[in-house]
Image (cartoon, rainbow, N blue to C red):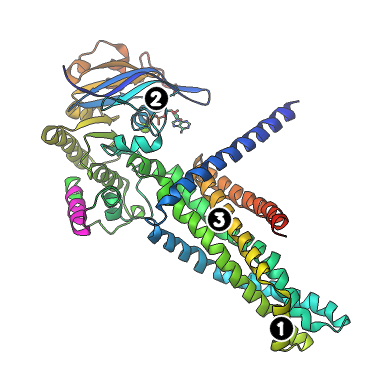
């Protein structure tokens, strides 16, 4: 019985927070009207998120491409169809792995640090101080971060796709002796513009999710340093789950 | 009749099941300095935050500049907030900005002044609080007392009609504290600024306060001219201003 009550309470707060997050999203969208005014700060955020993520995204992408090259290559060899390798690696990356892996890894890095930063500002009353100075904290802090997230994820996804293809080719060449031209031809044959576009739509949605969750969790942080730790963890977990759910939903809608 | 610039009527505010304010009434007159004293945790900071609409009361009315603010939206509230300066107890400087950028922020956001004019104004306010050559330092590099003074400079940068000081001299050395007290009094004299000062320091309370109010158990139990507070026969007031652990206020209550 007791457990039921705490469970019900947790479900209720969960639903409550989901509703709050939606309201937060509408506020943020409303303040997107100031996007042009906030361009300097937005560019700074894009630079910080994008350039800062390059090393980890590069590693992730090259190894993902290599693993795919290895696995798909062995199978294709059985059918004497190694010229398809580029197509298979390319299509998998463009449609699915590129956006999802990039989304997850960037959320773990950038989303977490955004929440920690904003959460610290919240508990040290910096956000209250902004409000007291008649400066809207959503405009000043959330608009640049959310817009930057929405722009950065698709860009990094393109980068992941290219780097992953390179990883696939390295393995294909080393293990199966595939040449560059057939590899490229395979890509051209299998990866349609629609695949690329859909992957970018996905990563845009993931960027929105990451920016929203990270900013919302930061802005609702309470309870000192421990609270910052808790909201940072929550931000990453919720972003991961929402990205995986959104991946299914968007795929369903697009194909 | 003196003009009332802040009026709080029958204010109730709880956090969870903890009641902080229960029936608070307060009037602040134009051009006066009102000092609020009270135990730690009695709701002084909460009262100041209610006045600028950072938190909303559970019940009761708040009028600032004659306008009811309890039903204003965040955007409508900005009109009022631009006319009020706030010194936070925690200073609440933006950690990612240096001292100069911190103080300049309201000017950058709300005015069309060019960078040279802004620089000048910032330097002027810094010298007002007795700081020099700290423009490029970041809040993390400042002592607690310096942060407080930067917080005061920031609160004054828009030349507000009302200034709310949350413990402006706590943590300052006696010399700087005295300079801040003089500053508060001068603003009142020269610019007819209305101030509310929350303090635990009775010496500065008598010095800067035209009136002093004691907040206790969610209400103003006594509010009067400073000289009358000194002579008060209210045992709560006597215990507080003499700083005794014996009397009607129990020590362990919070
Ligand atoms: N945002 C909040 N959430 C929950 N409780 C709060 C919040 N703000 C204040 N309180 C509680 O309200 C009470 C009054 O707090 P307040 O900060 O106004 O005290 P104070 O009179 O300023 O004390 P001090 O002299 O120590 O600064 C405290 O018990 C505090 O825990
Ligand atoms: Mg306080």
**Toward which corner of the image does residue A75 lie, by quadrant?**
bottom right
Q: Where's residue A199, x and y in %? A: 65, 64
Residue A246 appears anywhere in the view = yes
Q: Where's residue A85, x and y in %? A: 76, 79
Q: Residues within 10 Å of mark 2 (few under 14, many from 20)?
A: many
Give above or below for A94 relative to A251. Answer: below
Q: Which residue is mark 1?
A: A185
**Toward which corner of the image does residue A83 lie, by quadrant?**
bottom right
Q: Nearer the viewer, residue B36 or B241?
A: B36
Range drawn in magenta: B113-125
Q: Which residue is mark 3?
A: A111
Asked which secondary structure carries label 1, the reply is: helix
Residue at 27%, 45% in the rendered image: B154
Asked which secondary structure carries label 3, the reply is: helix
- Residue at mark 2: chain: B
Cβ of mark 2 under 8 Å from ligand 1: the answer is yes
Give the mark, 1 or 3, whose residue is nearer the N terminus: 3
Q: Is residue A132 left or right of residue A208?
A: left
Q: CA distance from mark 3 to mark 2?
A: 38 Å
- Residue at mark 3: chain: A
């Amino acid at each position: 019985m007791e457990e039921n009550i705490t469970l019900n309470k947790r479900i209720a707060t969960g639903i409550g927070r989901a509703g709050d997050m939606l309201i937060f999203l509408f506020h943020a969208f409303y303040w997107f009207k100031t996007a042009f005014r906030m361009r300097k700060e937005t560019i700074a955020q894009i630079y910080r998120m994008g350039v800062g993520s390059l090393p980890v995204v590069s590693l992730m992408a090259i190894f993902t491409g290599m693993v795919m090259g290895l696995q798909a290559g062995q199978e294709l060899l059985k059918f004497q169809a190694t010229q398809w390798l580029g197509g298979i690696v390319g299509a998998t990356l463009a449609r699915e792995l590129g956006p999802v892996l990039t989304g997850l890894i960037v959320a773990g890095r950038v989303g977490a640090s955004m929440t920690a930063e904003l959460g610290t500002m919240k508990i040290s009353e910096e956000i209250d101080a902004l409000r007291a100075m008649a400066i809207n904290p959503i405009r000043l802090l959330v608009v640049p971060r959310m817009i930057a997230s929405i722009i950065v994820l698709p860009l990094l996804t393109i980068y992941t796709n290219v780097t992953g293809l390179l990883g696939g080719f390295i393995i294909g060449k080393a293990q199966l002796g595939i040449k560059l031209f057939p590899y490229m031809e395979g890509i051209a044959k299998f990866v349609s513009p629609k695949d690329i576009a859909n992957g970018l739509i996905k990563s845009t949605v993931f960027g929105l999710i990451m920016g929203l969750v990270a900013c919302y969790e930061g802005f609702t942080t309470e309870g000192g340093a421990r609270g910052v730790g808790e909201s940072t963890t929550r931000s990453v977990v919720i972003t991961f789950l929402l990205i995986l759910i959104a991946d299914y939903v968007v795929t369903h809608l697009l194909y | 009749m003196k003009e009332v610039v802040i009026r709080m009527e029958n204010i109730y505010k709880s956090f969870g099941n903890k009641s902080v304010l229960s029936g608070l009434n307060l009037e602040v007159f134009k051009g006066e300095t009102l000092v609020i004293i009270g135990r730690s945790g009695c709701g002084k900071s909460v009262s100041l935050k209610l006045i600028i609409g950072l938190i909303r009361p559970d019940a009761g009315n708040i009028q600032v500049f004659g306008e009811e603010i309890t039903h204003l939206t965040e955007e409508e509230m900005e009109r009022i907030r631009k006319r009020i300066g706030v010194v936070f107890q925690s200073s609440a400087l933006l950690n990612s900005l240096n001292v100069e950028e911190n103080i300049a922020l309201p000017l950058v956001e709300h005015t069309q002044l060019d960078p040279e004019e802004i620089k000048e104004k910032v330097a002027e306010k810094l010298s007002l609080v007795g700081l020099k050559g700290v423009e490029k330092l970041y809040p993390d590099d400042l002592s607690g007392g310096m942060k407080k003074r930067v917080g005061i400079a920031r609160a004054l940068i828009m030349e507000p009609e009302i200034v709310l000081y949350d413990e402006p001299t706590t943590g300052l050395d006696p010399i700087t504290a005295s300079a801040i007290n003089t500053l508060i009094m001068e603003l009142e004299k020269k610019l007819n600024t209305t101030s509310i000062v929350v303090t635990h320091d009775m010496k500065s309370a008598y010095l800067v306060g035209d009136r002093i109010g004691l907040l206790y158990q969610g209400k103003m139990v006594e509010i009067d001219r400073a000289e009358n507070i000194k002579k008060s026969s209210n045992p709560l007031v006597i215990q507080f201003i003499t700083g005794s652990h014996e009397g009607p206020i129990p020590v362990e209550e919070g």
